[in-house]
Amino acid sequence: MASEVQTFYKDKVVFLTGGSGFLGKVIIEKLLRTTEVRRIYVLLRSKSGQDIQERFSAWESHPVFNSILQSNPKIMQRVAPLCGDCQEPDLGLSNSDRQLLVEEVQVVLHSAATVRFVEPLHIALAINTRAARLMLELAREMRNLQVFVHVSTAYSNCVVDHIKERFYPEHLTCPAAKVLELNETLSSDLVDNMAPALLGRYPNTYTYTKALAEQLIQQEAGDLPICIFRPGVIIATYKEPVAGWIDNLYGPIAVLYGAAFGVLRITRLNVKAQAGIVPVDYCVNMVLTCAWHTALESPSLRTEPTIYNFTPSEENLITWGGFRDKATSLSCHYPLTRMMWVPFLHCTTTPWIFRLVTYFYHLLPGYTIDLFLRLRGRKPRMIKLYDKIHKTIEILTPFVDTSWQFDTENTQRLWRRMSAVDQKLFDFDMRCVNWDDYFLNALAGIRIYLGKEEPGAETLERGKRIFWRFKVLHRILQFILCSGFAVLFWSLVKCLISF
């Protein structure tokens, strides 16, 4: 017997933006596996010389869809890609595709975004803000619309420490409509040059343009059945469709990846700050259930769109120090065969200490390796890699150096509203996340999906042998360095005594 949420999605037509992204792929898989949706229209653009049909066909070999394709090889026939682009003024939709959406769609899930923190402002505005307005305009035309979910971020209002489930237009330096008008009338270079003044206290164009999108929804959604989902830092899957799946190097996963390779050894990070990390499969379950709940709400009860903050539960918090320690302690279980040194990671919040230690931990070894590569007639790469790593660390610093308090009353209320069956099918209860179990799965996933290691006992055993070999070499190096410092110190002492 179908649950309440499953019953809602039965025979529904869904329009999804961002379907080729990390969150989007898991949304599609979950809908296909657990519901009987009639059709999922996915907005796709041509990319890297591939048209949308070629990109869509490649999904059939994607790890996320392996399980459902094995049980139902024709399941992807329910998914229909539509050519479009959120960066285009009209979403890049043809007139016929737009009319198709207007006539058929009942559920809109808008998750498309550029999550690059250093995206030029004019591009971030087009994708993250203007596209939200265009989606609202399209939704108003939809004859059978029942719900619209806008995926934002828990850090869209990171300029305050205590983030409630409400709108924060007061922190914007300029109204969203005016900023979009400037973006339309001024040159791209001029808009980008205005970024420092427009952003104000926002640390990057991503959080700023997501905040603008929220204000647009507050002002322009009208009586649309809409809600806003604000997830924390979205990381690898916890349980489904496959534990530990990850396909990108955004945010803290980049830190884990660099440390696992033995390349990243020092980073800027406050070990006492709360880590607002959430598994992508839990985010998907939350998106689908808040859509169901919003569709059930009486229009007369809506004063403005409901906002759902989704971050670790107060009863099961994890700090960035815990993140670091769990990943380090479990790294020996799933080591990479291509690691360059034994994984370890030191953290500091002091800029000058970070710069000093990077010289010994990163730059000195990097120049040594590059010299060795040059002598062998190969292209040097380590210093270029470390330059990229250090820039990434600087970009991430505001988010790993501060603790935010998030109110999640609406999220908790939604959980209590769900039946026991739906709570099991669409689990997003962060109170029950076993972080040790999670990181074990995540490290296994990093090894396979990012490190491109072959799954199986053979490569795993080879990785473990390499790990322990580097572990021994690491201890020998520590002994040599400590002995050298001791000898140097004793020599200085003797010199002082002789004087």
Image (cartoon, rainbow, N blue to C red):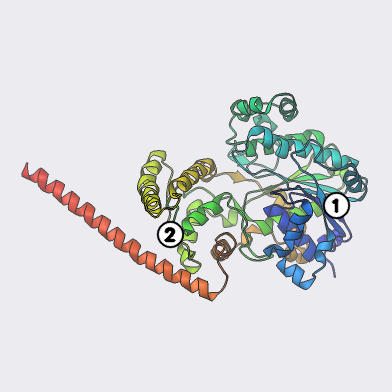
In the displayed structure, 227 sits above or below 429; it is above
Q: Secondary structure at mark 2?
A: loop
The quarter of the picture where residue 428 lies is: bottom right
In the displayed structure, 374 sits above or below 171; it is below
Q: Position of residue 454 (x, y in %)?
A: 57, 69
Q: Nearer the viewer, residue 338 or 316?
A: 338
Spatial CA distance of label 1 from label 2 is 54 Å
Q: Position of residue 445 (x, y in %)?
A: 58, 63
Residue mark closest to the camera, 1 vs 2: 2
Q: Position of residue 271 (x, y in %)?
A: 46, 50
Q: Quadrant of the C terminus?
A: top left
Q: Name, please, the residue furthest toward the bottom.
A: 457
Q: Which residue is mark 2?
A: 340
Residue 176 appears in view: yes
Earlier in the chain: of badge 1 and badge 2, it is 1
Q: Which mark is residue 63?
A: none
In the displayed structure, 485 sits above or below 92; it is below
Q: Nearer the viewer, residue 322 or 389?
A: 389
**Residue density around tag 2, few if under 14, some if 14–19, many if 20 or more, within 10 Å:** some
Q: Amino acid at mark 1?
A: Leu
The residue depicted at 36 percent of the width and 42 percent of the height is 356
**Residue density around tag 1, few if under 14, some if 14–19, many if 20 or more, within 10 Å:** few
Q: Quadrant of the N terminus?
A: bottom right
Q: Which residue is mark 1?
A: 296
Residue 303 appears in view: no
Q: Nearer the viewer, residue 310 or 61?
A: 61
